[in-house]
Image: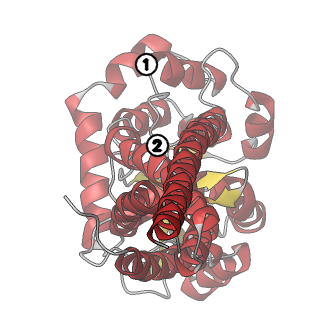
Amino acid sequence: MSGKKDREARREERIREDQEAGSAERRQRLIKLASAMAFLALAAVAVLIVISQSQSSGGDASSIADTAEVKQDLSGIPQSGMVLGESSAKVTLFEFGDLQCPVCKGFSEEILPQVIENQVRSGEAKIDFRNFTIIGPQSTPAGAAAIAAGEQGRGWNYVELFYRNQGTEDSGYATDKFLTAIAKGAGVPNIARWNSDRKSKRVLAEVEATTAEAERLGFTGTPSFAVEGPGTTGKQTLGTPGSSDTLESAISSAG
Amino acid sequence: MRAPAEGTLRGVATFLASFGIGVAVYIAIADSGGGSPVCVAGGHGCQTVAESAYSHLLGVNVAAFGIVGYVSLLACALLRGDGARMAGFAFALIGFGFSLYLTYLELFTINAICQWCVASAVLMTLLFITNSIRMLAYVGKAR
């Protein structure tokens, strides 16, 4: 009897050892599989990063686009400094923008054209572009470049052309080369003068002053708008209106 | 050092993933309304990050990818077995790796910090740690 019991006990132990060995083997196999999955997961991350990086477009100094379109859109409308429109227009729409801001680009292409055609071209209103540099370090030299272009009557051409060729936000594309390419595309007559003006303390101080003004008005994002006319008391802030119609009715009310 | 009980790890992962879903849904809703998440402590960081070109991937807000990731991680936390242990680890690794990249962009490319994105990155890091311990300590073992 005792021999039979021993045999059974040994047999059970063998089965248990086999099970443990099988379990350890399975665990080893799964850990190896997990390593392969980790490799695939990292590859997936790499693909996501490549897609994210490849989305950057625009900001290419060697191929400035839409110069003719911008010239056409603004033709026949007077410009003085950063103001677009007749100086005698009763209402002034102030746009506080950052040339590196993609939302401002969207406004320039989708919202403002209707206002420019309907109310600026007709002499009812003028638009004063003011720098509100919030995006990054290159926003200030970009804004100064626009002001310097404005001193030669091409401020709005500069702003509009910059937006049309805007690169990925604050990715370092707004180099001197890019700013100069925009100035040439915008038709700035004297590039040497523009180049010294844009670096002058006077112009840089103007960028800082308008940014401070935007903050004083309580704006926190770009573009932000304000309107001033016979129907307002000083600058009436509008924030960031969602449509051309909202801006148009604000201008009409201020007139 | 002994790993915490698997039930504890799954509980922690469930909590973290649920919280992550909340954060990602908030960012996605703020973006779909044409705005940006509001930074609790003020400042322009959230708006700057939300307006940056990096906030979208193939035209889709990265928060939407975050929602998918957190929901997957929640499912893995709720399920038992080796499949859930390994899938949880893989999803957490993808989320952690991409969060590292996004945090790098915030610090060195966009030069702005969005608290909601930081919150998500912290949650992903904790989920990666939790899921790694769960996988390494319990894969191949009985339920």
Position of residue A41 relative to residue B140, above or below, is above
> Front-most of B38 and A173?
B38
Q: Residue at x 66, y 38 (%)?
A: A51
> If the image is split into quadrants, where does the C terminus of chain A sit?
bottom right
User: Which one is in front in this view, the residue at disc 2 or the one at disc 1?
Assistant: 1
What is the chain identity of the residue bearing mark 1? Answer: A
Does label 2 or label 1 sit earlier along the sequence? 2
**Apparent side of residue B90 relative to residue A202 in the rendered image (left or right):** right
Q: From where the camera sits, is residue A229 visible? A: no
Asked where in the image residue A254 lies, by quadrant, the reply is bottom right
**Apparent side of residue B91 relative to residue A138 in the rendered image (left or right):** right
Mark 1, secondary structure of its residue: helix
Whether residues under marks 2 and 1 lie with C-beta atoms below 8 angstroms apart, the answer is no
> Front-most of A30 and A219?
A30
Residue extending farthest to the top is A192
What is the chain identity of the residue bearing mark 2? Answer: A
Q: From where the camera sits, is residue A209 visible? A: yes
User: What mark, if any, has residue A176 been given in the picture?
Assistant: 1
Density class for disc 2 (Cα within 10 Å; few <14, some 14-19, many ≥20) is some
Disc 1 residue type (three-letter)? Asp
Q: Residue at x 52, y 49 (%)?
A: A21
User: What mark, if any, has residue A81 been given in the picture?
Assistant: 2
Disc 2 residue type (three-letter)? Gly
Mark 2, secondary structure of its residue: loop
Q: Residue at x 43, y 31 (%)?
A: A145
Q: Give the total number of marks visible in the rendering.
A: 2
Asked where in the image residue B62 lies, by quadrant, the reply is bottom right
Residue B80, horizontal then vertical, whole percent: 58, 76
